[in-house]
Image (cartoon, coloured by chain):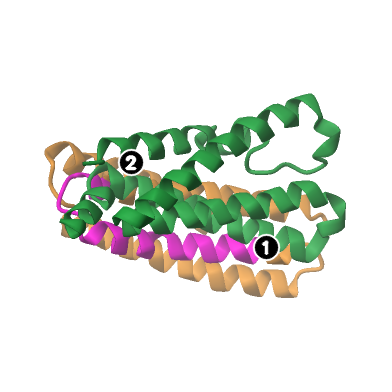
Chain colours: A orange, B green
Amino acid sequence: MPDVLPEALIGASLVTAALLLIPLVRGRRPGGVLFSLFGLIELGLLVLLVWSIVLVASTERDVDTATFVGYLLGAAAVLPLAVLWARNETSRWGNTVLIVGLLVIPVLIVRLNQIWDAAHG
Amino acid sequence: MADDLATTTRSGPGRLLVAVYAIFAIAATARSGVQIATRFEQAPLAYLLSAFAALVYVLATVCLAKGNAVSRRIAFAACSVELAGVLSIGALSLLRPEWFPDATVWSVFGQGYLFIPVVLPLLGLYWLRRTAR
């Protein structure tokens, strides 16, 4: 697995989740800066999706492809779904949905790396 | 009135509850789908249980999100089955590990998932009780 992008995405997701504590504590909805970060993370996840699929298609390793692509799709889908589900929430609880969505991303990326490492070619 | 109940069920803490349920519904469905499609013969009992758990999670997610009087009753049943499932499978996975060559979402009370599977039905039941009229 290419290291830089997955690690950057893990870091960005954790930092953004932590930043969401500010609107959570204040009882506000997340502002424009946070939404820009969501956009950047999502962009990175889409690049990771395409990149990793190309990688799996061209590798000699015996990767569990179905699970691998499943995690990739899950990682790319979770943030847009969280934003949609949090959108109509007027209370501070909308922020918790976004935090949980962001915390799922590092878990999925770590699992992706485990699947990749488990498949020694 | 009925709409109020639905809005109450899926708002505030309910918004987060449905989100976490949805994550488990999607994860369990995808995982058991892959397991049954690619290696069912390796652990048929574990994979069938995973599929059953996935079904319960989907039902609970949809019914909590819908939140009307009927779907709340179905959600209550789903959460109850889920609690019974995680407690019985959790205990069985410790007492009879040879029955489960591969883990299910409910093995060892959801240890592989930070024990969220055992807490989630309790929170679901509590939330349904608290938002009842």
Chain ID for label 2?
B
Residue at the limit of the structure toward the top, as seen here: B95
Specify the principal SS of the magenta part: helix
The amino acid sitting under disc 1 is Gly
- Residue at 30% x, 60% y is A85
| Residue A4 can be seen in this image | no
Q: Which residue is mark 2?
A: B128
Q: Are marks 2 and 1 on the same chain?
A: yes
Question: Taking A27 as reference, is A77 left or right?
Answer: right
Query: How far is disc 2 from disc 1 in space, using C-alphas?
Result: 30 Å
* On-image quarter of the N terminus of chain A: bottom right
SS under mark 1: helix
Residue density around tag 2, few if under 14, some if 14–19, many if 20 or more, within 10 Å: many
Question: Taking A16 as reference, is A22 left or right?
Answer: left
Q: Position of residue B56 (x, y in %)?
A: 54, 51
Q: Which residues are magenta?
A: A67-95
